Amino acid sequence: MATHIIAVINQKGGAGKTTVAMNLAAGLARRDDTLVLDLDPQASSRQWASLGSAPFPATVKQINGKWDAKTLHQNYKAYRHLVLDCPPSLESHASLQALRACDVALIPVLPSPIDLWASLRLPGEIDEARKTNKRLRAFLVLNQLEPKSALSAAMHDAIAEFGIPVLETGIRRRAIYRSAALEGVSVYQMGGRGALAAAEIEAIINEVIAS
Amino acid sequence: MTNLKDKLSASVRQAKAEQDQTAPKPVAIKSATPPAAPKKAAPKKAAPKKAAPKKAAPKKTTPKKTVAKTVKRKPAAPKAAKPTASAKPAAAKKAATQPLASGVADSSNALFPNRVWPD
Ligand SMILES: Nc1ncnc2c1ncn2[C@@H]1O[C@H](COP(=O)(O)OP(=O)(O)OP(=O)(O)O)[C@@H](O)[C@H]1O
Ligand SMILES: [Mg+2]
């Protein structure tokens, strides 16, 4: 079966790309062999995976240099799922190729006006990528939602302006996402404390895969 | 609340309109036409950036083989492959001793227990 590629992308820094990519990959790894490709020179995913006392549930590699969709499929066909942790830039080779290689572009956005404004170039880039990548589907996912924040609640309407579907499941702001990174594991490995976060990630996987 | 929603949506529309005027066209794949001249004087950015590098379809290059920094785990590794939420690896145990969220199942507000963002 062909490798399914999910690019976690947003040119806005700190939107949660790495957090989503790593936890998503851990969830996918419970189903099938999964590889995270860290495309960001910051190498946060790789750093994260190197911290655990046990191996991270998904393999994590950093790649530099030039590549394209074909080379990804050739080199990583042993994996059922590839998760691309993109750098915070749309100009980079990595981000452009990621959009041209992936089946799904998952775009985390923080519930803040500044983050919305800064993400507005994405729809155009996705349209552009679709000219060569016909199967590309894109979804926004709200990250760091705060249930008590009126702004968080107002997001769903504002984000519709992007013209990109928004996942039903939003990710709440939870300390466990940060603790898990520090421990070098995913929220799935955080026992009961990670259960609600893991449930969020599961719901996202189901939405993305079922769609 | 409705007011906030409207304001937020309007701000996004406005940002979009401004970016449409000033921002570089989407990268790659023949951005043949230059950006339309901005209607109203836009702040600084007006000068259209150099069209970003056209790397849409690089020729067949092999990736740098991902050499150096792979973090363990082969695809087929059988054990530890299916950690469950109830599994308690050492890491989780260690974390549980931190004061931050000890014994609290939902740690969502653990970092900012009382913080509520004002409307
Ligand atoms: N749902 C969440 N709850 C709490 N903290 C979060 C959540 N999502 C992300 N964070 C924290 O927010 C910060 C930014 O997240 P992350 O590094 O995943 O973003 P990023 O988009 O990958 O950033 P960059 O653009 O620099 O690569 C990190 O400190 C991360 O631990
Ligand atoms: Mg990152």
Image: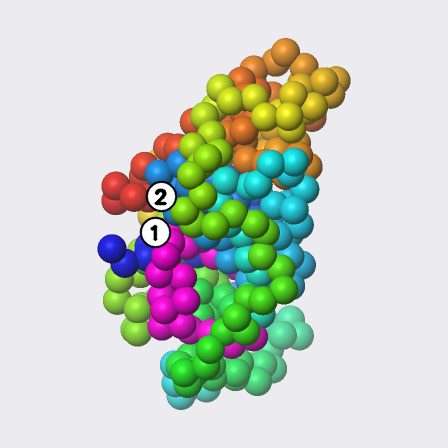
The residue under label 2 is A32
Nearest the camera: B85 or A98?
A: B85
* Picture residue at 63% right of the left edge, 11% below the top: B103
Figure quadrant of the C terminus of chain A: top left
Secondary element under disc 1, as helix, strand or loop, is: loop
| Dot label at residue A176 | none
Q: Is residue A73 above or below residue B12?
A: below
The residue under label 1 is A80
Figure quadrant of the N terminus of chain A: bottom left
Given the image, what chain letter belongs to the residue carrying mark 1? A
Mark 2 packing: few (<14 Cα in 10 Å), some, or many (20+)? some
Nearest the camera: A41 or A115?
A: A41
Magenta span has A68? Answer: yes
Say whether mark 1 is within 8 Å of ligand 2: no
Is the residue under label 1 in contact with that under label 2 (CB below 8 Å)? yes
Residue A33 appears in view: yes
On the image, the x and y values in percent for residue B34 come to 46, 86
* Picture residue at 59% right of the left edge, 51% below the top: B71
Given the image, what chain letter belongs to the residue carrying mark 2? A
On the image, the x and y values in percent for residue A169 come to 39, 34
Secondary element under disc 2, as helix, strand or loop, is: loop
Mark sitting earlier along the chain (2/1): 2
Residue type at mark 1 is: Arg
Residue type at mark 2 is: Asp
Instruction: Give, as a single range, the part of the protein colored magenta.
Output: A65-88
